[in-house]
Amino acid sequence: MAEKPTGKKRVAILISGRGSNMVALIEAAKADDYPAAIVLVVSNRPDASGLSRAREAGIETAIVDHRQFGEDRAAFERAMDAQLRQHRIDLVCLAGFMRLFTPAFVRLWNGRMLNIHPALLPQFKGLHTHRRALEAGVKRHGATVHFVVPEMDSGPIVAQESVPVLEGDTEETLAHRVLEAEHRIYPQALRLVAEGRATFAPSNNREASH
């Protein structure tokens, strides 16, 4: 496969499932003026359907199966980091990646790892966001792209979009509306970071060498 144009940030997307946000990023990165190139998709699950979608798009894939490492999270993360370094990755995008990283791994990628969360952070951190939004009776819900920090769903926000919560909404109808917002804002957020217009460099950041 031909090399991507120089000057673009090399991006890896981490997935655990179907990778719908991955597809949104891949589609956005096809534009000549997009400042990032998706060069690698990694899954912790060999059966993730998003892997075949990435291959169909001509993107290299890798599997780092967390189950092969048992309870040894550090060994799993070393294997993940080795894949990212081997492909000279500049930025990492989590897209439905259902594993929590240790603070040590997060610090290695400080300011260079993004996550998308289906809620308007700081509201509804964690799981089951749509159910909790409906139970809370909020009028607006949405999605957030943020830098990853050791504390879950707590990093600096890069982009957000809100959607209305409509009368009669179910978890499924609300989730569909939020997912459409996710697909809009994740490519926008990655563009901001790749262009250096959104940055995060905590004082304890030690840039990993490439």
Image (cartoon, rainbow, N blue to C red):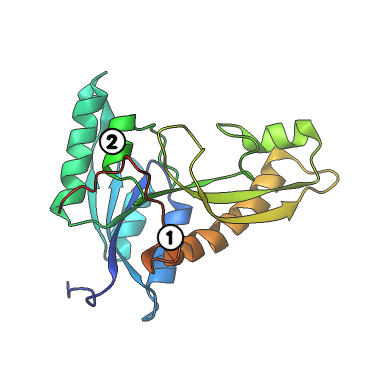
Residue at 19% from the left image edge and 28% from the top image edge: 75
Which residue is under mark 2? Answer: 105
Residue at 29 percent of width and 71 percent of height: 8
Question: Label 1 belongs to which residue?
Answer: 23
Left/right of residue 179 with respect to residue 41 in the rendered view: right
Q: Using residue 196 as the reference point, say whether residue 69 is left or right of it.
A: left
Measured along the vertical axis of the image, is residue 188 above or below residue 91?
A: below
Whole-percent x, y for residue 78 in the image: 18, 35
Q: Secondary structure at mark 1?
A: helix
The extreme top residue here reads 71
Image quadrant in which the C terminus is located: bottom left
Q: Is residue 154 above or below residue 210?
A: above
Residues 80 and 209: in front is 209
Q: Quadrant of residue 137?
A: top right
User: To which quarter of the image does residue 202 belong?
Assistant: top left
Q: Is residue 35 visible?
A: yes
Q: Residue furthest front?
A: 203
CB contact under 8 Å: marks 2 and 1: no
Per the image, label 2 sits on a secondary structure element best described as helix
Identity of the amino acid at label 2? Phe
Residue 57's label in the rendered image is none
Measuring from the top left, give residue 10's x and y in whole percent: 26, 63
Q: Nearer the viewer, residue 122 or 161?
A: 122
Q: Residue furthest right?
A: 167
**Circle 2 crowding by C-alpha within 10 Å: few under 14, some 14–19, many from 20:** some
* Closer to us: 10 or 175: 10
